[in-house]
Amino acid sequence: MTTNNILHDNEQIEPVKDLRKPSFWLLHLIGWTVYWFLFVIENTIITAKGSSGSSFLIALPLFVSASLAFVLTVPLRYVYQRSWQLSMGKLLSVIIAGCVIVSLIWTPTKNMSMWFFMHYIEGKVPMSEAVEGGVPFLYHFNSIVYSLAMILAWSTLYFSINYYYRLQAEKELHLAAVRLSHSAQIKMLRYQINPHFLFNTLNAISTLVLTGNKEKANGMLVRLSTFLRFSLDNDPEKKVALYDELKALMLYLEIEKTRFDDRLSVHFDVTPEAENLLVPSLLLQPLVENSIKYAIAKMVKDGEIQISARVVGNRLCLSVADNGPDASEILVDNKLVLQEDRNGVGIRNIKERLRVLYPNVHKFTMRRNELNGLCVMIEIPTEAN
C-alpha cells in the first residue's frame, strides 16, 4: 500500500525559505566590541578633551569591563533559550532577575579594574587610599544602575533579534502551509473527479442498471453527487473538523463498498472528544484510497479497513490500517519500499504538509499490522474547532 500521488512526478514541493540567523557569537563579540570602542572614544576624546596621552590608558580597564560583560552575559543566553515558552509575566521575571544578578557580579569587578588602572597605574591616588577612603553610596548605586541598564540593553537586543527571526520563520511557514495546502487540495480535487475514478463509479452504476438493480444504482448516484459537492464546496485553505473529514470518507467508502460489495468492510473507532478537533482537509482520504487500490483490490474476499481517532493527552492520534496481502513484500528493514511510486512523492507530500502545518510537533509512521497489511499513523496537536 502506498499513499496517493498528490503532486505530479515532475513537481517539487517548494521548500520553506531558509532564513539564516547570524551567529550568536559573532553578534555577541561585535556588540561588546562596539561598547568598548564607544566608551574609549568618550573617555579619551570627549571627556578628556585633549589631555595627556596617558588618558588613552583607560582603554585597558574598559577592555577588562567589556570582556567581563562578554563572559557574564553568555549564561544569560542559555537561560533565555529555556524561557521562551514561559508566560509573559514569568519571562519578564526571569529577564529582570538575570539582569540584576549579572549586574551585581559585573559592577564590583568592573569598578575594581577601573580603580586599579586609574588610581594605581596612573598614580593619581594610591590604591590603598582609594579603598580606605571609601566610596560614596550614590556612586555604588549609580554604578549598579548603569550596569543594569547595559545588561537590559543586551537582553533587549537578544530578544529583539531572536524574535525577529522567529517571526520571519513563522511567516514563511505560514505562507508555505498556504501554498502546500492549496496545491495539495487542488490536486486532490482533480483526483476526486478524474476520469479513472468516475469511470469506475459510473461503470458500477451502469452494471447495476443493466442487472435491474435500479434502487442501488440510484443510491450510488446520490452518494457520488453528494461526495463531489462536498469536495468542491470545501475551502482548501481551511482545516476542517474531523467529523466532516470522516463524513467525506464515509461518502467515498459507500461508493467503493458498492463496487467491491462483500470484499470490503470498514470499521470506525473514533472517540467523541476527537470528532470536533480540527485536521487538515483531505488528510486521511489518500491513505484510505490507497488501502483500497493496493490492498483491498488485490484480495478475493474479507478486505478490511480500520480507521481510528482518539485523543491522548494533548495529541490527536489518527490511523488508517488494512489487512492487505502485500505489506510483507514492501517492508524491508522496517522501511517502506514503494512499488507503485518508488520516488515517494505522495508520502513526502503528506509529510511535508504535516511538517509545515505542525513543525516539530507531529508524527507520521508506517508499520506492519499485527496479522497482515499496513498501518499508517499520524499524530498532531489537538486544535479545537
Image: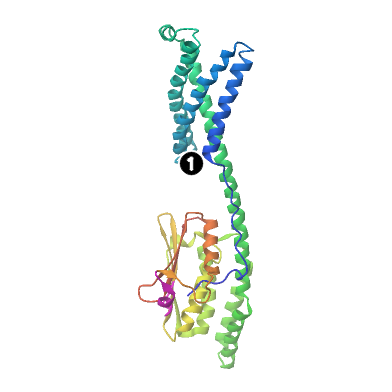
Dividing the picture into quadrants, the one containing residue 273 is bottom left
- Up-down: is 292 above or below 35? below
- Up-down: is 303 above or below 148? below
**Rendering coords of residue 1 (x, y %):** 47, 75
- Residue under circle 1? 84
**Rendering coords of residue 90 (x, y %):** 45, 36
**Rendering coords of residue 267 (x, y %):** 43, 74
Residue closer to the observer: 263 or 287: 287
Residue closer to the observer: 301 or 50: 50
Q: How many marks?
A: 1
Horizontal side of residue 302 vs 15, given as left or right: left
Residue drawn 60% across the image and 80% down it = 196
Q: Residue furthest left?
A: 370
- Up-down: is 227 above or below 65? below
Q: Residue furthest bottom?
A: 211
Label 1 SS: loop
Q: Is residue 326 magenta?
A: yes
**Rendering coords of residue 361 (x, y %):** 47, 54
How crowded is the residue under tag 1: few (<14 C-alpha within 10 Å), some, or many (20+)?
Answer: few
The amino acid marked with disc number 1 is Trp
Residue drawn 46% across the image and 32% down it = 93
Residue drawn 58% across the image and 25% down it = 37
Residue closer to the observer: 111 or 148: 111
Residue drawn 47% across the image and 43% down it = 85
**Figure colour scheme:** rainbow
Horizontal side of residue 209 vs 141, given as left or right: right
- Please state the extent of the stretch shown in magenta in the rendering: 321-333
Q: Is residue 345 magenta?
A: no
